[in-house]
Image (spheres, coloured by chain):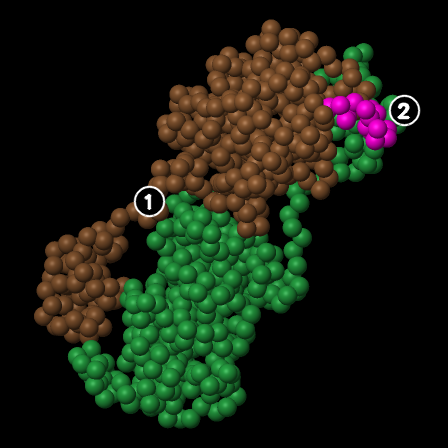
Chain colours: A brown, B green
Amino acid sequence: MSAAHLRSVPPVGEPVSEAERLARVVLSCGVEPGDGTTSSLVAQLGAERALERSLSGAEGEPGEMLAARLAEVDPARQLDQAERCGIRFLVPGDPEWPPGLDQLDGAITDEGFGGTPPGLWVKGPMPLTELATSVAVVGSRAASAYGVEMTRAVCAHLALAGVPVVSGGALGIDFEAHDASLSADGVTAAVLACGVDRVYPANNRRLLHHLASEFAVVSEQPPGSAPTRPRFLARNRLIAAITSGTVVVEAALRSGALNTAGWAESLHRHVMCVPGPVTSYTSQGVNNFLREGRGTVVTHGAEVLELVGATGEHLVDPPRGERRARDDLTPTEAKVVEWVPVSEPALVESIARLSGLHLRTTEGALRRLRSKRFVELSDEGWRLAPDV
Amino acid sequence: MSAAHLRSVPPVGEPVSEAERLARVVLSCGVEPGDGTTSSLVAQLGAERALERSLSGAEGEPGEMLAARLAEVDPARQLDQAERCGIRFLVPGDPEWPPGLDQLDGAITDEGFGGTPPGLWVKGPMPLTELATSVAVVGSRAASAYGVEMTRAVCAHLALAGVPVVSGGALGIDFEAHDASLSADGVTAAVLACGVDRVYPANNRRLLHHLASEFAVVSEQPPGSAPTRPRFLARNRLIAAITSGTVVVEAALRSGALNTAGWAESLHRHVMCVPGPVTSYTSQGVNNFLREGRGTVVTHGAEVLELVGATGEHLVDPPRGERRARDDLTPTEAKVVEWVPVSEPALVESIARLSGLHLRTTEGALRRLRSKRFVELSDEGWRLAPDV
């Protein structure tokens, strides 16, 4: 059975009917983000019929309240106002619609939270198709110097590889992720818990204005909406769904970044964790997530690229530690030096016996090792040079 | 099939024959530690017959060299000398023999390295039976302040719980592990790569003498043996096999501590890793080990205890993050405060609509929230108090 039989969403490229689009505007304005019941209804029936059903409000008081809210919405006026502010509304089937969002149909918690948003409000010239391979970089608002350093290093690496970074526009790790991407001439987009015409937090005004004028700011909330805590949680699922993987740089035990990581996990995206000192408050959540056997440790932007890139595109050599002088010895020399005691002199006979090599071979190797300053010869025998 | 059918080692409690014990002394003195071929032979035939076979030296030149070395050993004299130095020789079947060591029969690398040692030389009054539930704590010689702090915290916790700590007597993490255990009135033993009558490194002379006079110092090497690099690698398998689990606190990419962790892993012991900053040289090996999906993150001694203790003996509450004032609100208050926008005032009607609660319920909750200083009321409506 193809996906088309399961969902009533037109495939990308097929034009979306005006009625369907307007119905989605109504749902976007009248339904709280993360309302899994409505999302399921839309996935089954399409937005028009789901809206009709919701407007009938036949399901008791909560249904009536929703119906009243939906009836208030004038979708054409909403679209008109948005357009005048340079804000566009995307729905499934639009070429710019991030296909990863459709996976949210299957991601609804036991409490009925989640699901695909009816649409996305976007401000900024960058088409969201540029986020096809992108990485979410998220973390604590109260970032430490370590978190800032790691965020900037990872994002700069992604920028140099041409991989866009998505984050949430908050203070701390989010800000550093956007800012480091910009500093490295990279591409970055913010997904907000409020309307894309609003600035929250106020300290990030310059950043958010820059993203909205040069890149993209995204929200499932209609313009003008205020941020609330449930809307932050709903927003987190979009960050996870739009991107190929989520990097959690720093997160305290109750950090929202772990919520994003949880969504990424349930969507089978890569969840990448930067471990930190267990003595650091802002690494406790990350370390504990890893302790639960979740996520993959990443220690460098190259490791992030390797995971999110096409298979074999960004292969990383496993870290090997620094090369040591010993690595350049011949196999015989290396074998002999192994058997020179670390703490005291030994006679060539003893070294030959332990190494299993002929006496003459051993002696020759020892002499060469001496000229390479690996061993020293004294009256009592051969010993390792200091610091070997 | 019971283990007795697979191995020719007498079960604990059955007295070991004098001939078997002497054969094991010869093998211990004449065979390099970690010689998997000899270990396998001993496991199949018992030490006496394995020694006979090895003494015949019928397998070409390496066999002849081994035969010559074995023929030189006078086991009764070795035992005698050792006894005069307060050193005892343990073999499988002795009540004090650590049963975990027998598992090394099945742990031989493709290069033929590993296997159960023919015996153990022990100096110190503590019976090794005290290590029945014990933890290896290992790591870099070049420990950082973070590594030292974590080692001491974990070992102090284990000491308070009465769990002995085993380590390798080296500088850095090993030293701190032994020293912190002693400082907390705990039990600790060192497993060395040289004879138990020797001191290496010299800086740890006081520590090693103290362990040998009050606790236990252990080696598979006969007294007098010098430490060599292969002997350190062989020693690592003993640390892993004797203990219930290995904690790696800090390790650079090529650290011997990761070798110990690898042995623990192949013996199905708990391998516990303390993550650290990815920017720290001495945490790179640990973080990379975790990145390979190996080991379990531990962030506290209590988590170590939980893993190595009897099931349910040392349960740890999963870390929860600090309690917040919000946790003490009634469900209605908690629901209402969620929907007060984080950045601006809102009218009670809007908050009631979003929360799905009656207007009167919402207003009552807001008033109580105000007295608890969660929200503020201004002319424009209700807003979150700063820092909520």
Residue B360 seen by the camera: yes
Is circle 1 on the same chain as circle 2? no
Image quarter of residue B234: bottom left
The residue labelled by disc 2 is B360
For residue B49, above or below residue A77: below
Q: Nearer the viewer, residue A58 or B186?
A: A58
Q: Mark 2 belongs to which subunit?
A: B
Under circle 2, the secondary element is helix
Residue name at image x 46 percent, y 86 percent: B5
- Residue B50, given in percent of the width and then of the height, sits at 32, 86
- Residue B164, given in percent of the width and then of the height, sits at 54, 67
Q: Nearer the viewer, residue B21 or A205?
A: A205
Q: Is residue A243 left or right of residue A231?
A: left
Label of residue B294 in the image: none
Q: CA distance from mark 1 to mark 2?
A: 63 Å
Residue name at image x 27 percent, y 85 percent: B54
Residues in magenta?
A: A51-65
